Amino acid sequence: MPHHVTLMPPAPTTRKRRFRAKPLAAVGLSALLLTGCASPGGPAAPAASSSEKSGPKEAGAPTPRLVYTHDAGISVLDATTLKAVGSAELSGFNRLNPAGDGRHVLVSTGDAFRVFDTGAWTEPHGDHSHHYADDPKLTELAFEANKAGHVVRHADKTVLFSDGSGKVETFESSALGDAAVRGKLPATDVYTTAEAHHGVAVELEDGKLLVTLGNDEGRTGIAVLETGKGQERKEIARNEDCPGVHGEAVAAEEAVVVGCENGMLIYKDGAITKVASPDAYGRMGNQAGSEKSPVILGDYKVDKAAELERPTRISLVNTETATLQLVDIGTSYSFRSLGRGPSGEALVLGTDGGLRVIDPLSGAVTSAIPVVAAWEESETWQDPRPTLFVQGSTAFVTEPATQTIHAVDLKTGKVKKSVQLEHVPNELTGVEG
């Protein structure tokens, strides 16, 4: 399944930078949520200077790392200690996508997907593996793109989508590491959609390719292409009952979904099924899936005219029964608030500061973990906001207002560590090392 879902609303024409925290008295969650937030620790240790670099060192276990963007570039943390281990300067608004090899991150910079080396990796060696750690760095390697967009990792393949050209570029996820060490990019397969649009593509276990349909005037649905290479692929299924198609996720049993402005499309077992919204406009444009669950977690918006809607309902689409359940969680959230836990549980970070854990089958909110202070989403989607990223049994949550990152133990339901960062965090992702 894809381990990362790229959530990209249309960019506005103007850019503002702001983050506003609500007074705590305005929060709707319990008093426990207001007072139970972990106090941030001291500032993260500074990254090693160039004079301290000594090359890769072998480690006794994998070294998972976190990567976040900020106004000055990209910074890397040790995911266990939350200490800073390195950084790179990179101007502009940059988006982060794990490359799928456990080591690299692809940085969407507009005209390219640049390869960022987190400096942590594992090399198989017969019946065991060796683990290494080094200084992170922004490499010179880049996949050329015209408006670099979504990156999807699934079935050991990484798929890049260029919004400005419709180019779909696919490579073996594991091949990037070896190629990058040699200063090269891995071999890729390229398919180009009939018309350019803000889209996404997923390669399935059997080699079929799912691509979105659309052009610069609108997006309408999906097509599924047979196994093959490049433009030789033939279309075998299509559904255009999906206005504003956006995002993707994969559930258990190879069920792939995309969101629509009036529901969701499910591709499973060779057929495309539409799950309709109960409202004429009921957008589910951002989704999070899990191989442990047949249910897809999505957002749910009903005001097409809103500059920024602040929904309090989330959608749960069961890909086995093709049914939809809407759940009001009592707080609004943002497109960076959705995640899945290690057992498939649905996770939603609310603007009241609580991380809700939801049973995806019943829709019951089983717990609300106090993590950050109450916050309000900016109308400018590129602005920093509390962001959720899940790695293993730990949910990492950034808090731009206090320049802090929190590590939440999903097994105990408690914040186990909080560290103040050197920069105001924006996007957040990670690698297993």
Image (spheres, grey):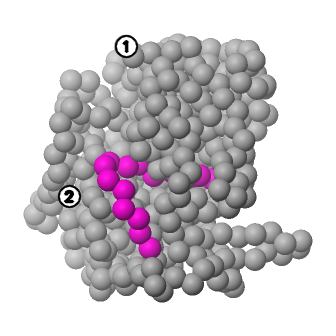
Q: Dot 1 surroundings within 10 Å: few (below 14), some, or many (20 or more)?
A: few
Specify the farthest residue to the right. 126
For image coordinates 29% across by 61% down, the residue present is: 72
**Amino acid at the residue labelled 2:** Trp
Pointer 2: what residue? 375
- Image location of residue 70, percent across then percent down: 31, 60
Q: Which residues are magenta?
A: 86-101
Q: Which badge, 1 or 2, is on the more N-terminal residue?
A: 1
Real-space Cα separation, disc 1 to disc 2, in angstroms? 35 Å
Q: Is residue 106 within the magenta segment?
A: no
**Amino acid at the residue labelled 1:** Glu
For image coordinates 45% across by 22% down, the residue present is: 197
- Image location of residue 278, percent across then percent down: 39, 23
Q: For residue 315, say whether it is visible.
A: no
For image coordinates 41% across by 22% down, the residue present is: 244
Q: For residue 303, say whether it is visible.
A: yes
- Image location of residue 170, percent across then percent down: 66, 37
The correct choice, above or below, for 262 with respect to 376 in the image is: above
Quadrant of the image containing the C terminus: bottom right
Number of the label disc, if any, that sits on residue 217: 1
Judge depth for marks 1 and 2 and give the one in front. Answer: 1
